[in-house]
Image (spheres, rainbow, N blue to C red):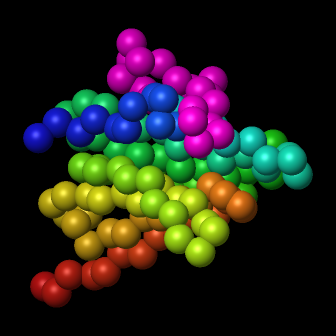
């Protein structure tokens, strides 16, 4: 199964812009969400033999948080209790990883990874 991120229009309709890292010719799909307080949330997908997602949150051009996870297989837009987010699913050695990226009304990154028994 080849990973394909959601269509560009889905990001644009939700308030994201195409980020400077966006380069489909190099299999890099990247979007940014800018906030009035100077914060910026970036979500970047790298398509290839090992597809990955890189999420970063900066405030006034200073990096606050970032995470990269390989083996992404699915991205879905979700909404509940007034919050909008992206939920990512992974395969193989990252199957127990849960990544949620909240983009409205505020940006935040939530990641949990369960250890597997040896």
The outermost residue toward the bottom is: 117
Count of picture labels: 0
Inspect this view and state whether residue 92 appears.
Answer: yes
Q: Residue at x 53, y 71 (%)?
A: 80
In the picture, which quadrant includes the N terminus?
A: top left
Q: Nearer the viewer, residue 81 or 59?
A: 81
Q: Residue at x 47, y 37 (%)?
A: 10
Q: Quadrant of residue 19?
A: top right
Inspect this view and state whether residue 62 appears.
Answer: no
Q: Residue at x 61, y 66 (%)?
A: 83
User: Does 112 sit above or below residue 54?
Assistant: below
Q: Nearer the viewer, residue 12 or 24?
A: 12
Q: Is 28 part of what is drawn in magenta? A: yes
Q: Could you tell whether 93 is left or right of 68 in the image? A: left
Image spot of residue 22 (x, y percent): 52, 24
Q: Could you tell whether 31 is left or right of 47 in the image? A: right
Q: Nearer the viewer, residue 77 or 92?
A: 77
Image spot of residue 101 (x, y percent): 53, 59
Image spot of residue 103 (x, y percent): 62, 55
Q: Nearer the viewer, residue 68 or 43?
A: 43
Residue range (magenta)? 12-29
User: Does 86 sit above or below residue 20?
Assistant: below
Q: Is 6 part of what is drawn in magenta? A: no
The outermost residue toward the top is: 25
In the picture, which quadrant includes the C terminus?
A: bottom left
Q: Could you tell whether 62 is left or right of 19 in the image? A: right
Q: Residue at x 19, y 58 (%)?
A: 91
């Amino acid at each position: 199964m080849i990973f394909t991120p959601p269509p560009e229009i889905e990001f644009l309709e939700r308030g994201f812009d195409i980020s400077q890292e966006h380069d489909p010719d190099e299999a890099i799909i990247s979007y940014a969400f800018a906030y009035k307080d100077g914060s910026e949330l970036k979500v970047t997908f790298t398509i290839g033999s090992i597809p990955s997602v890189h999420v970063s949150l900066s405030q006034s051009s200073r990096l606050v948080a970032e995470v990269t996870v390989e083996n992404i297989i699915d991205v879905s837009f979700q909404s509940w209790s007034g919050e909008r987010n992206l939920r990512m699913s992974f395969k193989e050695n990252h199957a127990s990883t849960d990544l949620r990226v909240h983009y409205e009304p505020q940006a935040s990154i939530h990641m949990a990874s369960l250890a597997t028994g040896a």
